[in-house]
């Protein structure tokens, strides 16, 4: 029996032409497509937007969010926070921006990371959570902008960088001064030999003490939906609830027993010194305890990293100074630089932007999310600048010199110092 010919092949020529004419009429009819969907009039088409969620958005995180929301290619869709009041505040802020009620809220950040429509996250929890949340985000396939300090200890720093290399995620540490023109120019002068052979880089700390968040008297724990205390502690050692420990910016700021002010400002100032010294993939090998308010570190090539509290020019907070054999430069948050010679400008006009805004840093991150390139404050740079701070904290805590083996990632012949490279982490948050 002959195979039956499909009905569609029995169309007559007349019927085909009539059908085609009807189809053409439909295609040629005016189609009303919103301009925003096509990216007209400055709008960004939905397919080109970066969908962002936030984790732990308090005071600093709210500022960061004000840098994200105006970006035309950002759509902020969700917030996760252990505090109900913060969840409500960020939802209100976001919904008012977009004129809808679409921003979703979560108590547990893992629910936010499980959403497959989110491309990137803003992590602005307390420092206790930064590395753990970043690694979880990378494993969930998200890119991230993470506030500083990014890690609690040396081993966490290494794990953070290794995770980003393995997963290929885009990571931007919140060291926004890397994207400010005058700091970038000062670092360029040092890195490119314009100051002659580099001799020393100087960073300002927020103190020379090692700190711990301590153990305060127990208070009645609030309902979990109001404040999830166990999730707030996360990987940190357990302690009873006390409202004075709820300031996430300060909680475990020093990485447990070591770090303190060196880690806090060092996340910025030492980071800039690392960049100036061309040391984004390394760290000093020798660390000395404070002498006359100065901690001196030494790189393998002999360049010194000096962390000092005084003797700075009046250029605002977060000052840095780079010294070479033929010149020097100093910069601070006022937006100005001071040079040993005006000839170092070589006719260039450097923009003066004071107040250390994060807008340029956020834009760098978003551009890299699209291009899959490395931002200025990438995970490798953050890893080694944090190691330089953690190791300095260990020298301060032990009050003696320590030497670090860059290949083995351990202190040479120093069991006590090596125990301080890491710390116990509560389940299930072990990295």
Image: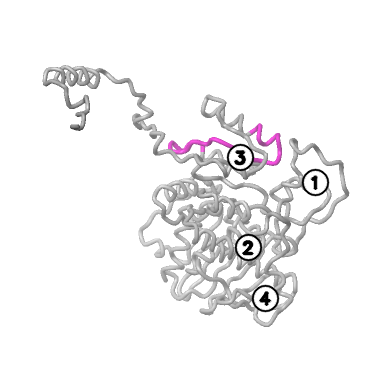
Labels 4, 3: front one: 3
For disc 1, the marked residue is 244
Question: Is tag 2's residue or tag 3's residue first in the polypeptide sequence?
Answer: 3
Seen in the picture, residue 231 relative to 73 is either above or below; the reply is below
Labels 2, 3: front one: 2
Question: Is tag 3's residue or tag 1's residue first in the polypeptide sequence?
Answer: 3
Are there few (<14), some (14-19), or many (20+) residues within 10 Å of tag 1? few
Question: Is tag 1's residue or tag 4's residue first in the polypeptide sequence?
Answer: 1
Residue at x 55% of width, y 38% of height: 66
Which element type, helix, strand or loop, lies under badge 2? helix
Q: Is residue 75 magenta?
A: yes
Give x and y (percent) for residue 265.
Answer: 63, 58
Task: Give the extent of the magenta segment.
Answer: 69-89
Question: Is tag 4's residue or tag 3's residue first in the polypeptide sequence?
Answer: 3
Give the Cα distance between marks 1 and 4: 34 Å
Are there few (<14), some (14-19), or many (20+) residues within 10 Å of tag 2? many
Q: Is residue 124 left or right of residue 208?
A: left
Give the Cα distance between marks 3 and 1: 21 Å
Seen in the picture, residue 235 relative to 53 is either above or below; the reply is below
For disc 4, the marked residue is 288
Give x and y (percent) for residue 211.
Answer: 76, 61
Query: Residue 3 or 371: which is nearer the viewer?
Result: 3
Question: Is tag 4's residue or tag 2's residue first in the polypeptide sequence?
Answer: 2
Q: Residue furthest left?
A: 13
Could one spot residue 280 in this view of the protein?
yes
Q: Are marks 1 and 4 in contact (CB under 8 Å)?
A: no
């Amino acid at each position: 029996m002959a195979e039956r010919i499909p009905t569609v092949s029995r169309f007559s020529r007349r019927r085909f032409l009539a059908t085609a004419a009807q189809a053409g009429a439909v295609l040629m009819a005016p189609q009303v497509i919103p301009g925003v969907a096509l990216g007209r009039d400055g709008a960004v088409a939905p397919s080109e937007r970066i969908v962002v969620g936030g984790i732990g958005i308090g005071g600093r995180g709210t500022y960061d969010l004000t840098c994200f929301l105006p970006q035309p290619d950002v759509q902020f869709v969700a917030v996760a926070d252990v505090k109900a009041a913060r969840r409500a505040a960020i939802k209100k802020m976001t919904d008012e921006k977009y004129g809808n009620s679409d921003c979703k809220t979560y108590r547990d950040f893992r629910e936010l990371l499980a959403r497959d429509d989110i491309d990137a996250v803003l992590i602005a929890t307390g420092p206790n959570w930064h590395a753990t949340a970043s690694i979880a985000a990378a494993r969930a396939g998200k890119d991230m902008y993470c506030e500083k300090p990014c890690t609690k200890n040396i081993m966490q720093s290494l794990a953070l960088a290794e995770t980003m290399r393995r997963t290929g995620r885009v990571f931007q540490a919140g060291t926004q001064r890397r994207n400010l023109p005058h700091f970038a120019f000062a670092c360029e002068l040092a890195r490119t030999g314009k100051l002659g052979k580099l001799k020393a880089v100087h960073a300002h700390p927020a103190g020379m003490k090692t700190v711990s968040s301590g153990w305060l008297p127990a208070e009645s724990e609030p309902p979990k939906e109001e404040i999830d205390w166990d999730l707030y502690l996360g990987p940190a050692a357990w302690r009873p609830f006390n409202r004075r420990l709820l300031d996430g910016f300060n909680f475990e700021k020093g990485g447990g027993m070591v770090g303190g002010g060196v880690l806090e400002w060092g996340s910025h100032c030492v980071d800039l010194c690392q960049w100036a010294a061309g040391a984004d993939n390394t760290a000093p090998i020798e660390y000395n305890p404070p002498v006359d308010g100065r901690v001196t570190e030494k790189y393998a090539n002999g360049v010194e990293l000096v962390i000092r509290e005084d003797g700075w020019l009046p250029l605002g907070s977060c000052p840095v100074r780079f010294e070479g054999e033929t010149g020097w430069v100093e910069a601070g948050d006022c937006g100005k630089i001071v040079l040993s010679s005006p000839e170092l400008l070589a006719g260039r006009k450097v923009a003066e932007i004071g107040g250390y805004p994060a807008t340029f840093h956020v834009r760098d991150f978003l551009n890299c999310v699209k291009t899959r390139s490395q931002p200025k404050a990438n995970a490798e740079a953050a890893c080694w600048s944090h190691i330089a701070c953690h190791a300095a904290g260990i020298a301060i805590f032990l009050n003696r010199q320590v030497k670090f083996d860059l290949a083995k990632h351990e202190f040479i012949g120093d069991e006590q110092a090596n125990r301080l490279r890491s710390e116990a982490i509560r389940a299930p948050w072990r990295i």
